[in-house]
Image (cartoon, helix red, strand yellow):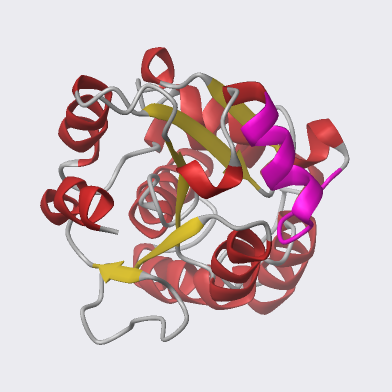
Amino acid sequence: MNQNKAVIFDLDQTLLDRTTSLIRFLTWQVNFFQLISANDREPFIQRFLELDDNGKVWKDRVYENLIQEFSIQGYSKEILLASYIHDFNKFSCCFEHVENTIIQLKQQDYLIGLISNGRTPFQEHNFYALGLTEFFSSIIVSEAVGLRKPDPAIFLLSCQQLSVHPQDCVFVGDNEQADIQGAKAVGMKTIFFHPNPAISSAIADANFHHYEKLTTIVSSI
């Protein structure tokens, strides 16, 4: 029995397939607002992904650049940003087999938690849209608590909410500094996720690229 053991997840590019979700959203946004010609749609989306830098750059700056580069008329960065904030979650999707994996972990009596660096309530809405909330005993978004990974305090807060010791936790994430180093610093086991099999972490306790493998890895480390 693992009643006092927990698996804690990052959100973006770990549970949430952010790149796929973003491409779906941008395809809709470009069409809905008729921002650019059909020929420019793919270059626009690719440029957004470059400027966004895996979510590190907030979208007002991204849209400001795109409006200039693509000579977009009639829509301000404020309008496009508001659409992003309100509509992105409608296109949120998980990586394949995430839900089945979460259910298996619950059946094995693991407590499940989430720690996401990001803005509130934006990240909460993106997470709720995945339909996994009922399985999670703790949901932490950095802006809401005034802490950010890799700060040890945010990992310890998750442990406190789950009533577990750090050494009884496994943290699953895609960012080597924020997720893996941060979790290791408080004594958690760590598992690095990347959908590309060519990308792994040398410092994590384990790596995986497909969610079918995760339950086996969790029980073995």
Instruction: Please name the residue shown 59% across and 45% down the image.
Output: 166
**Image quadrant where residue 157 sits:** top right
Instruction: Please name the residue shown 39% across and 12% down the image.
Output: 134
For residue 220, above or below residue 199: above
Q: Is residue 156 magenta?
A: yes
Q: Quadrant of the N terminus?
A: top left
For residue 69, above or below residue 189: below
Chief secondary structure of the magenta portion: helix
- Work out whether residue 15 or residue 216 is closer to the camera in this orientation and state it: 216
- Work out whether residue 103 or residue 55 is closer to the camera in this orientation and state it: 103
Indicate the position of residue 214 as horizontal and vertical percent values: 21, 52
Indicate the position of residue 120 as horizontal and vertical percent values: 74, 32
Count of numbered badges drawn on the protein: 0
Q: In the figure, is residue 199 to the left or right of 90?
A: left
**Image quadrant where residue 209 sits:** bottom left
What span is colored magenta in the figure?
147-160
For residue 9, above or below residue 56: above
Instruction: Please name the residue shown 51% across and 70% down the image.
Output: 49
Residue 122 appears anywhere in the view? no
